[in-house]
Image (cartoon, grey):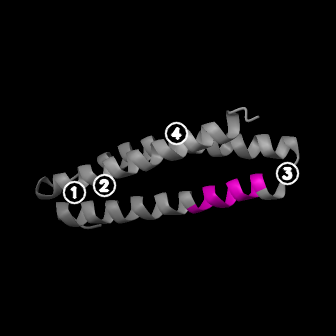
Amino acid sequence: MATDPVTRMEQGLKLVNLVFMAAVAATIIAVLVIFALHPDTGQRAMIQKILFGAWTLGPPVGLVAQHLVWPPAIAEIERFRTQQALIKAVWAGIVGFLAASFFGHWG
């Protein structure tokens, strides 16, 4: 593992971005399954609970882990903050969408 703080932070940013993009892709696939294939009520509820739970807890835990395992380098602190702020904004939007889609009453 790299000892240079900037290199360590770069590795952390890349890993977090990769995991976050994989989670977004998995969520898109799961939402398409829910709305396109119309699984039975039990399967639908299970998928919704797993997705909502994962998105509610996953990104905050990931951001804290990123800060602890790959701390920001002093020279790159602003980049680290910007990346975390972007992930938080996207995370809030996804959680809001999932909450409205899964738990909202339409019509």
Mark nearest the camera among 4 and 3 is 3
Circle 2 packing at 10 Å, graded few (<14), some (14-19), many (20+), is some
Residue located beneath label 3 in the image: 39
Query: Is residue 62 toward the left or the right of residue 74 in the image?
Result: right
At 62% across and 37% down in the image, what residue appears?
Answer: 100
In 3D space, how far apart are the residues under numbered discs 4 and 3 (Cα atoms)?
Answer: 25 Å
Magenta-colored span: 25-35
Q: Are marks 4 and 3 in contact (CB under 8 Å)?
A: no
Q: Position of residue 31 (x, y in %)?
A: 69, 54
* Quarter of the rendering occupied by the C terminus: top right
From the viewer's perspective, is residue 63 above or below residue 21? above
Numbered badge on residue 79: 1
Front residue (pair 42, 66): 42
Q: Secondary structure at mark 3?
A: loop
Among the two numbered marks 1 and 3 on one chain, the one whose residue lies closer to the N terminus: 3
Q: Of 86 and 75, which appears nearest the observer?
A: 86
Tag 2: amino acid = Gln
Q: Is residue 11 above or below residue 61?
A: below
In this figure, which residue is indicated by the disc labeled 4?
57
Answer whether residue 29 is magenta in the image: yes
Label 2 element class = helix
Q: Residues within 10 Å of mark 1 (few under 14, many from 20)?
A: some
Q: Position of residue 9 (x, y in %)?
A: 25, 60
